Amino acid sequence: MTISLTSACRLPLKILAIQFKYFGDAVLMIPALRAIRERWPGGSLHALVPEEVAPLLQHLPWLTCVWALPRRRGHARLKPTWPILRALRRERFDHSVDFGGNDRGAILSLLCGARQRLGPIHPGGFIGRRFCYTHRVSPAPLDQHETLRLLHTLSAWGITPPRSLEIEIRTDPALDAFAAQLLPERRVICHLAAGQPKKEWPVAHWACLYQMAAAAGLRLVFTTGKGAREQSLADVLKKLAPDAPVLPPTPALATFLAVLKRAEVFIAGDTGPLHFASGVGVPTIALFGPTSPVQWAPLGPNHQVLLGARCNCDGCADVCKSASHCLAAISPDQVLSRLQKFLSPTRPS
């Protein structure tokens, strides 16, 4: 069923988009936001996301406002959250769309007070989730890319895909000088960590790639997350390849985005920074094994995928349980060959 958005509400429309899942999910929501903007160019388009995710959207010129809500997993933070919710209610949104469809997104949809509230139908969750929306839509099949699945949610509003499905992230220009200090020369950035260990290429492979690339005259630099486990990956790399340069953890996501923009190529597993790099216009080489590139790989001609062996792990498991890690089947030679093609002077820009 298609919901009419023009007959019963004032113009221009005021719309709130909500996404309370992970970093990558927020990035892959951007084409859907662009589709809303192209459908109603004169409307007011707001986004409500977790505080740590907001830098991904803050500098998009076609968004009216990005609302950053404090979040702590498993705990409600009523004291800092309530003033933001009151301000959102004062906006008197005509419509809201919750792209995540989880408990937190559903409750926020209800509390923000939009007259029409759209959300996806997902199993599980608290029993009152479905009553938080005025309209619900069944999810698209899992064999589609996640950007298309998010756009499917908007089909209830009669919205078609935007002119481009590629990700767009704008960095803070005030951070360009600081990013140049951290990475004075453009290099190939390799990201060691992922949200789940099973999505990480073996550190020994990274060390081998660094040594082979250095012998070929290519300049690699490594990044990782700020957590103790992620930092331990950098420690192992330095033991295996003492000369491998590792950038210090950046103080904030906005700074990391500014550094990413300076990369020649970005190499990583299926992780949020992979989508950050594609969003700031950097070519990527994605290393996929336990997750589906059909659903999660960056889109566009500047992004390449290398596939590991077939993975038999439980999709919900954080750590690979197979005797041989599926990503280990991607050899350093394969990655170097793909990288050299990206950096070839005869390759079209």
Image (cartoon, rainbow, N blue to C red):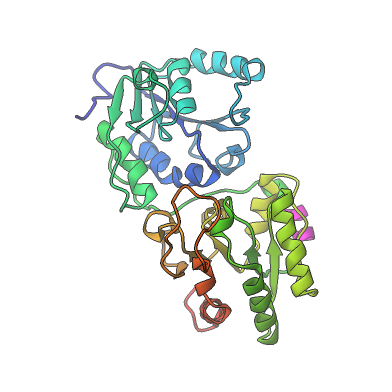
Q: Residue 106 vs residue 227: left or right?
A: left
**Residue 277 visible in image:** no
Q: Position of residue 115 (x, y in %)?
A: 36, 15
Q: Position of residue 265 (x, y in %)?
A: 58, 68
Q: Nearer the viewer, residue 114 or 80?
A: 80
Q: Is the N terminus in the top left, top right, bottom left or bottom right quadrant?
A: top left
Count of all numbered marks drawn on residues in the image: 0
Q: Is residue 344 above or below residue 309?
A: below
Residue found at the very far front of the displayed protein: 323
Please tell me whether residue 180 belongs to the stretch shown in magenta: yes
Quarter location, residue 97: top left
Quarter location, residue 280: bottom right
Q: Is residue 40 above or below residue 303?
A: above
Q: Going 62% across and 48% down the picture, which residue do you hit?
A: 171
Q: Residue 138 vs residue 38: left or right?
A: left
Q: Is residue 163 above or below residue 189?
A: above
Give the overall secondary structure of the magenta segment.
helix
Q: Going 77% across and 59% down the picture, which residue do you hit?
A: 182
Q: Is residue 230 above or below residue 246?
A: above
Numbered range of the magenta stretch: 176-184
**Residue 332 visible in image:** yes
Please tell me whether residue 288 belongs to the stretch shown in magenta: no
Q: Position of residue 158 (x, y in %)?
A: 24, 35
Q: Position of residue 189 (x, y in %)?
A: 65, 66
Q: Going 52% across and 69% down the picture, which residue do you hit?
A: 324
Q: Nearer the viewer, residue 285 or 114?
A: 285
Q: Going 73% across and 68% down the picture, which residue do you hit?
A: 237
Residue found at the very far left of the displayed protein: 1
